[in-house]
Amino acid sequence: MRICVLGGDGYCGWAAALYLSRAGHEVAIVDNFLRRQWDFELGVQTLTPIQPLADRIRVWQELTGKSIELFIGDVADYDFLSSMFEDFQPDTVVHFAEQRSAPYSMIDRKHAVFTQVNNVVGTLNVLFAIKEFKPDCHLIKLGTMGEYGTPNIDIEEGYIQIEHNGRTDLLPFPKQPGSFYHLSKVHDSHNMMFACKIWGLRATDLNQGVVYGTVTDETSLDEALINRFDYDDVFGTVLNRFCVQAVTGHPLTVYGKGGQTRGFLDIRDTVRCIELACLNPAKAGECRVFNQFTEQFSVLELARMVEAASRKMGLHVDVDHLPDPRVEAEQHYYNAKHSKLLDLGLQPHYLNDSLLDSLMNIAVKYQDRVDTSVFLPQVNWRNARNRRSKLQAAAAIAALESKS
Ligand SMILES: NC(=O)c1ccc[n+]([C@@H]2O[C@H](COP(=O)([O-])OP(=O)(O)OC[C@H]3O[C@@H](n4cnc5c(N)ncnc54)[C@H](O)[C@@H]3O)[C@@H](O)[C@H]2O)c1
């Protein structure tokens, strides 16, 4: 297949592009390096030293003999996207190219507007480009489990059968997104459903859980292929942050009671899910939804797991409960269905001791690159205007340390 990976310089996109290339597909990467710019803006960097994209691709080609085409540009720029479509003629587009941090979207008005414009316009452009240049192309779009929120009923995969006043219908599952970022994903989902209905496009909306892990079979072939490992308060994910905090002797920062429960999956399962979606495309006119995660954990459960892994390494770790900067339920019912990818053949890698050890070892290996001033949350949902400066964070860290 000719598969175009939008956002292929990012965390999921890079791992997926290599996996699909190794599996024998013709792969193109599209990216405009926004993610690297956001790191500069926030004064953060991935724990792992990622290489420039052109170097990564060159090393991949030298090692495997497989080439990856590269298109540098903005998905939200329709002229650029059109020329890419005309040139590459993808059979499948895998769309990762969005601003994906909830805290980033909650910094202030500017960041909320940017997130929604970048994400919603980008996805609209992809839908129009498919319609105009390759109507049979299958769109695989990354959504998020966060679109559903935490309802007090089981979460279905995209649609729910509802009976109302004696009549029944299969309707989109109600959405209760928890940030302006999550709202952008809900808007995307509606636009995709609508485009499939009116133009007969084929789309798969992958409502992904939180991804952990850095290593895949492909990225481990050479240090130059290493993937991102984000642990900061804005782009970092909770498990990464806990591992880095444990290794550097800082308390694990649980927000509130820590009962917030979410779906999680290993990056090795992300890439396999993408492949499964590519190989089993949606039908013309179909906008199907898969819940893409393998296990659910509460934040406190993850903290306890990292605490136990640390103890095995001879590290003493405290767990600290900070006021929750987000507006969210700190304890709630959560049971989300996730059988459709398993039915297609996904064999999950579950979070176990050896995976936790490998995450901790990455944190140990790159300990010199850790910036402890980005551990604490600096974006509060209750503020319309957050200042996020590294100086403030350093002061807050010092206060936390003196307390513990
Ligand atoms: N990482 C997770 O845990 C997770 C969980 C659920 C859903 N997702 C979704 O998966 C997708 C990928 O996430 P990720 O963690 O790899 O993010 P990432 O930030 O590491 O990668 C996104 C990539 O897209 C690029 N990009 C963004 N806007 C662009 C634009 N307008 N034009 C061209 N390139 C653009 C960025 O430069 C970056 O390289 C996102 O849509 C995200 O919402 C991720």
Image: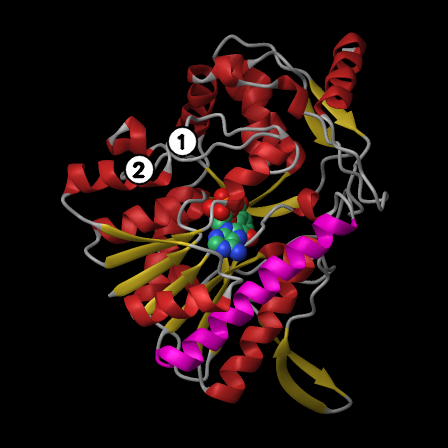
Pick the front one: 358 or 138: 138
Q: Which residue is mark 2?
A: 56
The spot of residue 129 in percent (x, y) is 44, 74
Q: Amino acid at mark 2?
A: Arg
Q: Is residue 157 rendered to the left or right of residue 397? A: left
Whether the magenta-drawn stretch holds residue 390 is answered as: no
- Residue at 85% of width from left, 44% of height from top? 382
In this rendering, the answer to whether 195 lies above or below 246 is below
Task: Check residue 137 in the rendering and tell me which mark sits there, or answer none.
Answer: none
Q: Residue furthest left?
A: 65
- Residue at 62% of width from left, 14% of height from top? 317
Q: Is residue 97 visible?
A: no
**Occupied quadrant, residue 80:** bottom left
Q: Is residue 37 visible?
A: yes
Q: Which residues are magenta?
A: 109-136
Q: Is residue 133 rendered to the left or right of residue 142? A: left
- Work out which quarter of the rendered image holds the N terminus and state it: bottom left
In this rendering, the answer to whether 80 lies above or below 227 is below
Pick the front one: 228 or 308: 228
- Work out which quarter of the rendered image holds the C terminus and state it: top right
Q: Which residue is mark 1?
A: 50
Mark 2: secondary structure: helix
In this rendering, the answer to whether 274 lies above or below 48 is below
Q: Amino acid at mark 1?
A: Ile
- Residue at 40% of width from left, 49% of height from top? 8
